[in-house]
Amino acid sequence: MESPVLSMAPGKLSSLPRTIITLALALLLVLGLSAVTTQPASAMTTSCNWPRCTVNLSKKETRSYAYHGILPSFPSSTGIAQAAYYVAAMTNRWFAIQYANKGMCVSFVLSAAPWERQGMYGRRC
């Protein structure tokens, strides 16, 4: 019997590798946010229940992330990948600035289920 990963059409992943990748990204998101904010995250709350992880920042942390967030260096040496990383990071910070200016907080949601919402969202706090 052939492995389901090997017998698939090119360009498609089975659900197991996709789930592993999603969980790894959730872990990096939760760990990375503590490195990105410049002040200790005393009011930051995290919750991970299958299939989603959520990180909620307070007003102070949202403002700190938006205006003083430190970007970790990108490990790749290719210019295109670095540019894409920088654009994505700066776009997230721009949205965080908009939420902070309206007095809202930021939540980051990452889910293993592809039909659920994912990403950065503003919330009332």
Image (cartoon, rainbow, N blue to C red):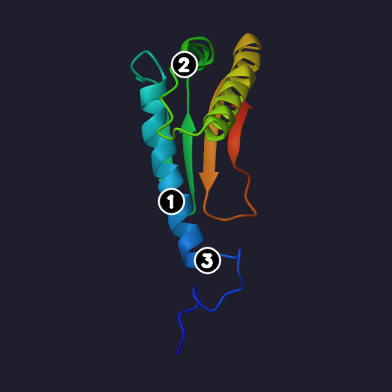
* Residue 124 appears in the figure: no
* Residue at numbered disc 2: 69
Q: Position of residue 80 (x, y in %)?
A: 57, 33
SS category of the residue bearing label 2: loop
**Residue sitting at 61 percent across and 63 percent down?**
11
Task: Work out whether residue 125 or residue 28 is closer to the camera in this orientation and state it.
Answer: 28
Left or right: 40 as drawn, with respect to 117: left
Left or right: 20 as drawn, with respect to 62: left
SS category of the residue bearing label 1: helix
Q: Position of residue 91 (x, y in %)?
A: 62, 24
Kind of residue sitting beneath label 1? Leu
* Residue 77 appears in the figure: yes
Image quarter in which the C terminus is found:
top right
Where 111 sits versus 106, above or below? below
Kind of residue sitting beneath label 2? Gly
Task: Work out whether residue 83 or residue 2 is closer to the camera in this orientation and state it.
Answer: 83
* Residue at numbered disc 1: 23
**Mark 2 or mark 1, which is nearer the start of the sequence?**
1
SS category of the residue bearing label 3: helix
Estimate the spatial distance between the alpha carbons at disc 1 and disc 2, rounded to whole Å.
Answer: 24 Å
Q: Are marks 3 and 2 in contact (CB under 8 Å)?
A: no
Res 118 quadrant in image? top right
Q: Which mark is residue 15?
A: 3
**Mark 3 or mark 1, which is nearer the start of the sequence?**
3
**Residue sitting at 59 percent across and 19 percent down?**
96
